[in-house]
Amino acid sequence: MRRLTVLAAAAALCLVGAGCASVAQWARETATPTATAPEGEGEPPIWRDSEAVGVPWDGALRAGVRLPAEGEHHITWDPVLRTVGNRPGRRWATDTTIRATLEIAEAHRRAHPGAPRMTVGDLSRRDGGDFGVRFGAPGHASHQNGLDVDVYYPRADGRERAADHVGQIDRALAQDLVDRFLARGAAVVFVSRETGLRGPPGRVQYIPHHDRHLHARFGPLRGP
Ligand SMILES: [Zn+2]
């Protein structure tokens, strides 16, 4: 509501001839991102049967479901802007990926009542497809068909935001998330070796640039 009021005020000022560019700038600065999602972004997902087309590195998403910007057991993180509350266009996946992600977040917190809410990063774009560097560095080679989800490791200090480096991670809570994604059917979970996180060979894979977040990939891994 506050954001709408700000925008309405900005529009009204534009109508009476004030400097629209500066008013728009003021509106942007006033609508400071906080842990509270913009109006409507916290609403429940609209469930429908989704289709993962192709493969995660060359695919598309049909009838995707959008993850709420935040909920009782999760928040979202914009990895480009480095803000809480990932942008709506970066939070789409298949219904099964969204359902699994929400269930893991809830089960993780029920098992660890003091844990921060699970911090979810990028999923896919609304229709899937390219999610490369033109959507913000460093971009994703995959995340194209609604089966990939990035989750930032819980911080040892309990803050609900991405860690800045591997030393800030609560390893026990992070391992719990890896275990839960595997148990919930993720085909593979990518982590960086320096995290010290473990799992069955082949299903937990070590790759660079995953020292602050895990990347879980659900099946099916082949499209129609
Ligand atoms: Zn990823």
Image (spheres, rainbow, N blue to C red):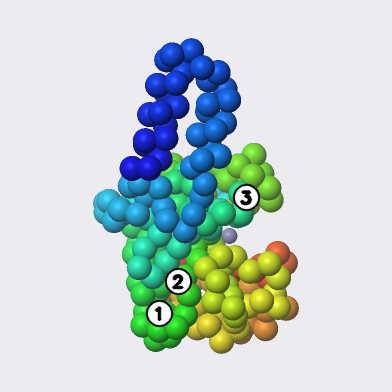
Say which residue label 1 marks. Answer: 109
The x and y percentages for residue 40 are 33, 47
The residue that appears at 48% across and 75% down in the rendered structure is 116
> At 42% across and 56% down in the image, what residue appears?
36
Alpha carbon separation for disc pair 2 and 3? 20 Å
Q: Earlier in the sequence, mark 3 or mark 1?
A: 3
Percent position (x, y) of residue 155?
59, 75
Q: On the image, numbered disc 2 is attached to which residue?
A: 117
Amino acid beneath label 1? Arg
Q: Position of residue 79 (x, y in %)?
A: 60, 55
Is 167 located above or below residue 141 in the figure? below
- The secondary structure type at the circle numbered 2 is loop
Disc nearer the start of the sequence (2/1): 1
Q: Quadrant of the N terminus?
A: top left
Choose top left, top right, bottom left or bottom right for residue 170: bottom right
Residue 32 is at least partly visible in this image? yes
SS for callout 1 = helix
Q: Which residue is mark 3?
A: 80
How many residues crowd around disc 2 within 10 Å: few (fewer than 14), some, or many (20 or more)? many
Q: How many marks?
A: 3
Tell me which corner region of the image, top left, top right, bottom left or bottom right, holds residue 200.
bottom right
